[in-house]
Structure formats: structure tokens, C-alpha cells
Image: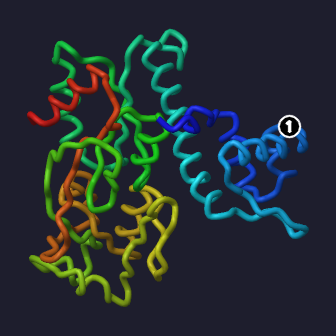
Amino acid sequence: MDPLETRLETRELRYFVAVAEELHFGRAAERLGMAQPPLSRAVQQLERRLGVCLLERNRRGVRLTGAGEVLLQEGRAALDAAAAAARRTRRAGGADRPGGPRDRLVLAVKAAASHELLRKLLAAYAVEPGCTEVEVLLCGMCEQEEMLRDGRADVALMHTPWNSLAGFDSEALMTEGQVALLPAGHPLAARKTLSLAEIRDVPDLPLARWPTHGTYAPGPGPEIHNQTQLAQLIALGRTVAVVPDSARSWLWAEHAAVPLTDAPSVVTHIAWPAHSRSLALACLVRTATRL
């Protein structure tokens, strides 16, 4: 093993990441709650040990070098992994809440998605000999990945093509088509099928815009923050949405769902960190694959 790998301490990475994100030693020191001189010395010592220049310093400020960009990316991942390990360890020991059980799984699920699958999974898992308590953590669009990486969740139901499974182990559980959700009184609602092109260019009914990692794509349609908002806007005739077929479970009388002939299939996966050795999690995954 390269001996340098053992010399990177969490404290040093935290110092460097703060400077790299702020690009200012004074602001980074304030953020870390420390004086600037020891912070500058710590970064300089890190550069000497690594044998590379991480930051270019001049009168105009601080700029990351190519090596610094790499360490910023890797350092963030390492700090996230350390925080995740701490969260999961505390959860396993019941230290994350007073009087909590000694073992508990947190399952991240996108709000309003996979209703029937989730109900069947929780019911089937509850009678397994190796089961433990499952806390369902409802989240927004594409948030499951972040929750798995930072330790807020142990396992998640994720949906491709929207969620990334990179870095996780996973099992596919269900594949379904997509539908257009329209106001029930709209002329297109009477159609048996629609194409994506037909719903993209409706002058009075712009497509709803969902966030991807907190960012909305440009367009005339409304920015959607949650299911209730979406349902209300569709009922009012303000937008149309493309959603998995299973979304029919929460439709209102004012809604209509029309199958889309050319929308990509949605695959629901159960995903978990690749390094997990939790027996309770393994039992949950086995239960899910048998549904």
C-alpha cells in the first residue's frame, strides 16, 4: 500500500475541503471556527506530504490546481463516507434517538411512488425471522442517492432512468410503462394512447418540470416540488405530467391517465451501499426479490 494513503486524516480533509469550497482562507477559517494561521499551516503541511501543489495563492485570492480539484472530489467522498459510517453505527446501537431499538433500517422512498410495492414489501418483511424495525423516509425527486451516500438511509427504492445506481448494489423489482397525467376535461384525455411529442407541444398545457439534484431544466411548465402541488395544478388545467403507470393509485376524479406509446420503461430497484454487511438489510433485500 502507498504509505501516503495512511497519512490523510479526516481533520486535514475537512480543512482542505473548506478552503477549496470557499476559495478564501479567512472565510474557511470562520466556517471551521478556527484561526486562519493554523489553517494555512495545515494545508501547507498537507501539500508537502503529498508532494503536490493543491492551491494557487495570489493577491486576487485562491484557485484550485488540477491536483486540488481531484482532492476536493475525493475528499468530499471520503468525508461523506466517514459521516455515513458514523450515522449507521449510531443507528445500529440505538444512539440516534432516546430509547430507540438496537437495530433499525431506514428505507428511503420517493414520496408518492411505489405505493403497492412498498406496502407488500413491508408486510412480507414484518413476518421474516430476521426482520427489524423499518423506518420509511419519504424524500423528493432523486434524493434517495444522496441519502444512501451520507448515511441517512440504509436502503432505498430507486427508479431508473431517473436515479443513478452507480456505486450501489441493487436488484430490479418491477418494470412499468409511463402515462400522461392530464386534466380530465382536456381533449387529449379522451385518447386511448399518446406519444411524447403530442404532449410536449400543447400550447395551453406545458409539461411539469421536476428537479434533478435540485436543478430544474428550463421550460414554460411549472416547477414541481411535491405530489400535492402537481395534483392540484393538473386538476386546475395548468400542466401535464409524465409519470409511471403506478401513479394511477393517487389520481383524483379531476385527473385522467393516458398510456404513452414511446416513453421509456421505468424500473424500480432496491438499492443499498455495496459495502453493507447488515443481516437485517440482506433479509429485506431477499424479501423484496421474492415479491
Asked if residue 124 is positioned above or below residue 77 in the image, the reply reads above
Residue appearing at x 74%, y 58% in the figure: 55
Quadrant in the picture for residue 238 = bottom left
Q: Tell me if residue 37 comes above or below residue 234 in the rendering.
A: above
Residue 106 is left or right of residue 285, and the answer is: right
In the image, what residue occupies the spot 31% across and 22% down? 278
As rendered, which of 52 and 175 lies closer to the eye? 52
Q: Position of residue 103 (x, y in %)?
A: 38, 15
Residue at the image position 33 percent from the left and 40 percent from the top: 156
The answer to whether 212 appears left or right of 76 in the picture is left
Answer few, some or many: residues within 10 Å of disc 1's Cα (few below 14, many 20 plus, some between 14 and 19): few
In the rendered image, the vertical position of residue 262 relative to residue 201, given as above or below:
above
- The quarter of the image holding the C terminus is top left
- Amino acid type at image mark 1: Met
Q: Disc 1 designates what residue?
A: 34
Q: Position of residue 270 (x, y in %)?
A: 25, 41
Colouring style: rainbow
- Give the residue at x 37% y 32%: 154
As helix, strand or loop, the secondary structure at mark 1 comes to: loop
Q: Position of residue 36 (x, y in %)?
A: 89, 44
Q: How many badges with numbers are in the image?
A: 1
